[in-house]
Amino acid sequence: MARLTVELMGKPGCHLCDDARVIVRSVLQDFPRAELVEHNILDDVEMFENFKNEIPVVLINGQRHSQWRVDEDSFRSALTKELA
């Protein structure tokens, strides 16, 4: 059975990250085989350097899906496709 790993890169105090988190968590309720892993880019120097100007960034199974804003329909579609 296919599994999904969704990663959300962000940091505290980032309103776009908060918005993305709400959408990601809401959509993932319909995908019980998906695991959400949240990363605080402030905890890792390399991650901070890679993502500091792009957060929030959402990865699906290691592949970049979105940055700055998460479109609910596009995110749902990408998850469905990944499970196909």
Image (cartoon, rainbow, N blue to C red):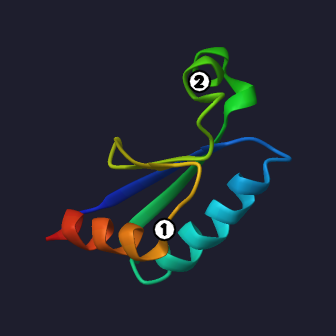
Along the line of sight, which residue is nearer the eye, 58 or 37? 58
- Residue neighbourhood size for the residue with mark 2, other residues' Cα within 10 Å, grouped as few (<14), some (14–19), many (≥20): some
> Which numbered circle lies on residue 71?
1
Q: Quadrant of the N terminus?
A: bottom left
Please give the name of the residue rendered at 62% of the width and 61% of the height, measured from the top-left corner: 20
Q: Position of residue 70 (x, y in %)?
A: 52, 62
Please give the name of the residue rendered at 68% of the width and 31% of the height, measured from the top-left corner: 41
Along the line of sight, which residue is nearer the eye, 11 or 74? 74
Specify the amino acid type for callout 1. Asp
Q: Are marks 1 and 2 in contact (CB under 8 Å)?
A: no
Q: Position of residue 35 (x, y in %)?
A: 45, 61
Observer-side mark, 1 or 2, equals 1
Q: Considering only vertical position in the picture, is 53 above or below 16?
A: above
Q: Earlier in the sequence, mark 1 or mark 2?
A: 2
Q: Is residue 43 left or right of residue 2?
A: right
Distance between mark 1 and mark 2 Cα atoms: 23 Å
Please give the name of the residue rendered at 61% of the width and 46% of the height, measured from the top-left corner: 56
Secondary element under disc 2, as helix, strand or loop, is helix
Q: Considering only vertical position in the picture, is 55 above or below 34?
A: above
Specify the amino acid type for callout 2. Met
Q: Residue furthest left?
A: 84
Q: Is residue 45 left or right of residue 62?
A: right
Q: Which residue is identified by label 2?
A: 47
Q: Position of residue 16 (x, y in %)?
A: 71, 55
Secondary element under disc 1, as helix, strand or loop, is loop
